[in-house]
Amino acid sequence: MRFIKLILLIFLIALFLVFVVQNAVIVEISFFNYKGYTPLFVLVLFSVFFGFLFAFLYFMPREWSLRRIVGDLKEGVERLNRGFFLKAEQSFQGNPFTETFACFGAYEREDINKLLNFSSPLCALMLLKLHYIEEAKEKFERIIEQEPENLLALKGLRDINFLKGNLKDAVELQERVLKNCEKWDRENQKKILAELLASLYITSKDGDHAEKAFDVYRTPLTYSARILAYADSGKERDAIKLFERSFEDGLHNQILMILIEEEALLTKLMDIIERRRDQINTIVLALVYLRLGLFSKVKPLLESLPGYYRTLAVSSSSHREEDRMCAKILEESLKAWECVCGTRYKEYTPMCANCLRWNKIELKL
């Protein structure tokens, strides 16, 4: 490497000497009332020198500023990686460019006042994760006013509207998210939109929402909403066919648990349930029978049921008032749905209210 540099240096010196020899002619120069003579190569060199000097003086202040920012950024990131959140935050202060990094330190320390003072969209997201819903909502709305297609703000407002039960607004926001999201995230956002539409059908009973949800993405919830929509509109055969189709997709257990409160619908689906009982999870099958009061069908399943569900089944079918009260308590405490964060739910929900993640709740019996 040094040899190459030496060769390059010699080559440049040679070029310079050639330039001097070929431009040694004397030329006259004048500046206001002053005149003089100088070799042409000296005039060219001075012009080049002053050109570099002016550029240097122009850009140097900006370079010093950038060096300071980069230095603070490097120091702050190193402190973040070592867990010194307050010191990292001090390194990031005073510059809007590094404010986003300061959010991490304030979030870890749960310093709400600092998060409220920062303008970065990430700070609004962190307020939401800390469950300061109203404060996060206000920040997200201000961001949307300035930048209507800010994905972070759109997703945050969508989550807040879902938590508050404003499903129609959540759907509208999610449609904007899906329109602007990156390619890698598109499938996940389609699934979220579908489940929001399915949830909207369950509250509004507008069949168009159930149909659109099923067309956008097939999930246990969109299947359930579509089956319910068929049943509610008197299309029982379509509801039965769609339920039977869910066995091909392996979603039947989740669908039965979502529809467990719909006793009239379960009764209409009983022929398929009986015909395909070997494909249904034993616990799910037992819970369906218990919901419909088919205690004689539960008895053959008792030996294969875990202790909790066996106790629930036996207590439910008992004639003693104390046993039935015990069964009621057990049924009320049953939370069959679990998020990856460990939070359990009695009923299925597309988004976990604890960790605010979508599509991470599964049937855990």
Image (cartoon, grey):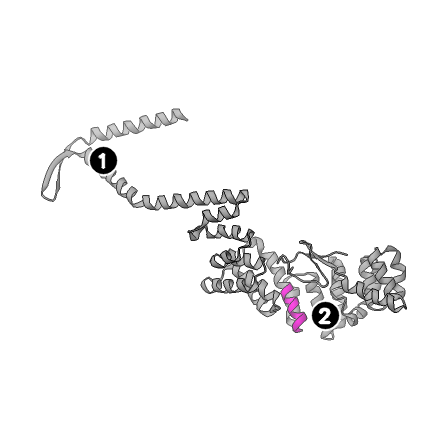
Residue ID for mark 2: 228
Q: Earlier in the sequence, mark 2 or mark 1?
A: 1
State the residue at coordinates (74%, 57%).
Answer: 250
Horizontal and vertical percent position of residue 261: 76, 68
218 lies left or right of 275 = left
Q: Quadrant of residue 349?
A: bottom right
2 lies left or right of 273 = left
Describe the element under mark 2 as helix, strand or loop.
helix
Residue 96 seen in this snapshot: yes
State the residue at coordinates (47%, 58%).
Answer: 117
Q: Is residue 203 magenta?
A: yes
Main SS class of the magenta portion in the image: helix
Query: Magenta stretch?
Result: 195-204
Residue ID for mark 1: 45
Task: Using a 10 Å C-alpha cutoff, classify the residue at mark 2 as few (fewer than 14 neighbours), some (14 to 19) or many (20 or more).
Answer: many
Front residue of 222 and 351: 351
Q: Is residue 104 magenta?
A: no
Q: CA distance from mark 2 to mark 1?
A: 85 Å
The amino acid type found where label 2 is placed reads Leu
